[in-house]
Structure formats: C-alpha cells, structure tokens
Image (tube, helix red, strand yellow):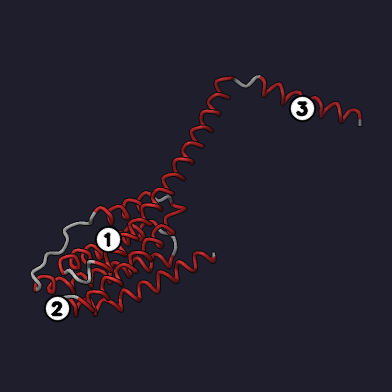
Amino acid sequence: MRHTLLLSAAALAALSLAACNKPASTTAADATDATKAAASDAASATGSAVSKAEDATGAAVGATSANALGPHDTAAFVSNASQSDMYEIQAAQIAEKRSKNPQIQAFAKMMVKDHTKSTDLMKPLVQAAGQTPAAKLDDRRQGFIDNLNKASDADFDKTYVDQQVAAHKEALDLMNGYAKDGSDAGLKGGAAQIVPVVQKHLDRIKAIQASMKKS
C-alpha cells in the first residue's frame, strides 16, 4: 500500500512539474484562442438575434401592406405578387442546397415549381392590365434572403420555416384581398386561382413547423 501511495504521489508531482514547465507562450496562445472563440460565439448569437428581429419586423410590415394597400391598388398588388414569387423561388433554392431535412427539401422543391407556375399565370394578366412586375426584390424581402444566407447550419431550418410561415400568411392575405376587392377583372381572377395554392403551402409549412417543435 505504501509503495502504491508513493507511486501515485510521484505521478502527481510529475504532472504538476510538466504543467509548470509549459511555455508561457503556449499558455498565452491557448488563452487567446479561447477568448477569440468566446467572442466569435457571442457575435454569432448577437447576429442571430438581430436577424430574427429583422425578420419579425419585416413580416409585420408585409402583413400590414398586404391587408391595407395591395387589395385596393393594382400597381401595389402586382409589385408585391411578383416579388412574392421571386422571394419564394430564391429562398427555396437556398433551402434545397442547405437543408438536410427531407420535409423542407420537398417543400422547397414544391415552392420552385408552384411559384414559377404562378408567375407564368400572372404574366399575361399583368400585361393586359397595363402593369409592370417588379424587376427585383425590395429591401425588405432582400433582407429575408440575406438573413437566410447568414443563418448558421444549426439555425437554418428554423429560419427558413419561420420566414415561410410569415411569407405565406402575407401572400394569402394579398391574394384573398385582391380577389375580393381588386379593380382589374383579369388580375382578380388570377388571384382567386392562386389562393388555394397558397393556402396549401401555408398548411404544409405550418405542419413542418409543428413537427420541428416536437422533435
């Protein structure tokens, strides 16, 4: 027993000596690396919180616009409807590449297909109404795309799904509103055709969102 205790004491002494003899530069480097890692984690968490706040604000602005202006102003309706399709397609293309969730991958594939189809449906109706679709995303929707691209791998699926729930609520309000109160008969008919498609998308993405909360 005494021999074992002596060996243990010797081992502890050797470990202590090794630690004391560790170069100061190595210790300083380790501390610097740890500090940098902590700062990076903090910056990432802050950036994620800012992006979520921006998305929430953008969703609120979109909901207000879809309910207040789009249904009564044909130019506003056309601009928002065309940007909605553009945003959905761009976001879906990012999700197809980045998400590892089969449900989200399938949803994103459906988005590209269905929103390309709705763009093609509305194009002649927009021309007949003497309107011009938006050429690019506005700052609000571009912000959604930027935040989606900036999302970490761990946050990506939630960011995409949360954006999609808000975007489809907005699109549904926009289409329902113009189908009911719009001034151009052709565009009203087109909006009415798109309503059930958007409703299907909203139901599906809400189901995916619910399944993610359970897992």
Give the x, y percent position of residue 172. Answer: 30, 72
Disc 1 is placed on an element classified as: helix
- How many numbered circles does the render carry? 3
Query: Mark 1 to mark 3: distance in Å?
Result: 63 Å
Q: Which residue is mark 2?
A: 186
Residue 174: image quadrant is: bottom left
- Pointers 2 and 3 in contact (C-beta within 8 Å): no
Give the x, y percent position of residue 81. Answer: 22, 67
Q: In percent of the image, x 37 and y 61: which residue is there? A: 163
State the mark number for residue 172: none
Q: Nearer the viewer, mark 1 or mark 3?
A: 1
Amino acid under disc 1: Tyr
Please say if 26 is above or below 209.
above
Give the mark nearest the N terminus, 2 or 3: 3
Amino acid under disc 2: Gly
Please say if 151 is above or below 37.
below
State the mark number for residue 12: 3
Q: Which residue is mark 1?
A: 87
Give the mark nearest the N terminus, 1 or 2: 1
Amino acid under disc 3: Leu
**In this orientation, which residue lies closer to the viewer: 101 or 152?**
152
Give the mark nearest the N terminus, 1 or 3: 3
Query: Mark 2 to mark 3: distance in Å?
Result: 85 Å
Please say if 6 is above or below 132.
above
Give the x, y percent position of residue 197. Answer: 30, 76
Give the x, y percent position of residue 71. Answer: 22, 71
Quadrant in which the N terminus is drawn: top right
- Mark 1 crowd level (few <14, some 14–19, many ≥20, 10 Å Cα): many
Q: In percent of the image, x 33 and y 68: which residue is there? A: 168
- Pointers 1 and 3 in contact (C-beta within 8 Å): no
Residue 68: image quadrant is: bottom left
